[in-house]
Structure formats: C-alpha cells, structure tokens
Image: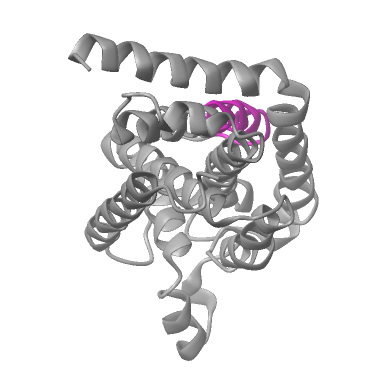
Amino acid sequence: MTLQQQWVAFCSIFRKEVNRFTRIWIQTLLPPVITMTLYFVIFGQLIGSRIGDMGGFSYAQFVAPGLIMMAVLTNSYSNVVSSFFSAKFQRSIEEVLVSPTPDCVILAGYVLGGVARGLMIGVLVTVLALLFTSLSVHSWFVTISFVVMTSVFFALAGFINAVYANSFDDISIVPTFVLTPLTYFGGVFYSTSMLPGFWQTLSHFNPIFHMVNAFRYGILGVSDTNVTVAFIGLSLGILVLFAVSLYQLKHGKRLRA
C-alpha cells in the first residue's frame, strides 16, 4: 500500500472508532461523568470538608487530578477492549486482517480511537471538576504528556486483553480484578506519604500510582516520587505493549478461525 492508502485506512478505522462511541454516548460518555460527579460531591464536598488540607491544597483540589486520570485510563482501556473484541467475536476483524493494511496501521487506528475517548472523558471530567474546585496547571508539558501517554498505555493494554479474551466475561476480568484495585490503591484519594513505611514502599510498585502522581504534579506541582522515573517507566511500558500487540496481529493467533 502507498502512504496515502495507509493514511486512508488509518482514518477509516479511527473514524469508525470515534463514531462508535459518540453514537452511543449515553453508554460511553455519560456514565463516567455521572460517576465522577458523585465522587466530587461525596469526597470533594461532603467528606472533603471534614478532612481538611492535603499536600497544601484542599481535599477537592487534591483528588481532582486523580479522578481525571482514573476516568481517562479506564475509558481508554474499555473502549479498545470492547470494540476490538466485538470485531473479533463477529469475525469482521478477519476481513481487516486479510486486507493489505499494515498491522501498525490497524493497531494505531484502534488505539487512537481509545485515546480519543479517554481524552474526551478527561476534558468532560475536568470541566466538571472546575464546578467544585479551582485548578491551575503547574506544568502543561507534564500534564499533557502524562495524560496522553497513560491513555495510549491503557488502550494498548485493552487491545492485548481483547486478543486473549475468548468471551465477553473474559474482557471484564482484568478491569475487575486488576485495574480497579490498582486504581483505588494508586493514590487517587490520598497521598502515599500518609502510609506506613512498608505500604508506602509497596505502593511505589503500582504503575498507576506513578501515573496519577505525575499528572497531579503537572497540575498542582506536588509529587510523592520522581516524575522523571515515571516518564521513563511509562515510555518503556508503551514500547513493550506496542511490540506485544504488533506480534499478536502479525501471527494472528486467536484472531483467525
């Protein structure tokens, strides 16, 4: 395929992904907004007013970056895993795989579709957060780079989950038993400096903690760990997941009948 044909193929897959989640916005965009509204009301206003300041900020300001990042990563993940598994379940993905479209173009179309949904939810939750508290960005570079890289990382993870899944039940195992616990123990609602030594050290092995912490640093300017280490680790993680995803597409195992 020529570069122009590859660009047309990429745009077709990406546009299909965006049209899919915007067409069913009541199922894809509205629920996370309602969920985050409840979080801001309960933790930001009702409970937060009794907790007081955390890290030099009000509790609502402190949890806002974590809630935004939580919405971004879960929606980037769920968009790709549900969309690609549906294509695999309906056998429509086989038509794409037998076409001359390069694997990297197919992967980029699905992943950037997930990134688009994650970032759209991130913008909606940010606007929502500004109704409950005030936020000012400390570093635009750190904020934007981490929110984009995190959405790419989880979109790739969702793609790998979709390839290995054999049923719709399988695509809910990772979010339920892995993603949700890591997110809730990832410093979204608290600073790890509050934890005893052992638990503080253990939490530093949680990758979501570093993503949330770096994003919070980008907005508030406070950090529990080294942001540069998080940047390097997240970059390496994306490269590994990208390589695994391409390998799966190239060999077609679990994708072709």
Q: Quadrant of the N terminus?
A: top left
Q: Position of residue 217 (x, y in %)?
A: 37, 50
| Residue 94 visible from this viewpoint | yes
Q: Residue furthest front?
A: 257
Q: In the picture provided, is 38 more to the left or to the right than 212?
A: right
Q: Quadrant of residue 19?
A: top right
Question: Residue drawn 67% across and 35% down?
Answer: 132
For the stretch drawn in magenta, the main secondary structure is helix
Does the magenta-highlighted stretch encompass residue 59? no
Along the viewing direction, whichever of 247 and 213 lies nearer the viewer: 247
Q: Position of residue 196 (x, y in %)?
A: 52, 87
Q: In the picture provided, is 170 more to the left or to the right than 15?
A: right
Q: Quadrant of residue 166?
A: bottom right
| Residue 119 visible from this viewpoint | no
Looking at the image, is 3 positioned above or below residue 38? Answer: above
Q: Position of residue 179 (x, y in %)?
A: 59, 60
Q: Magenta segment range?
A: 120-134
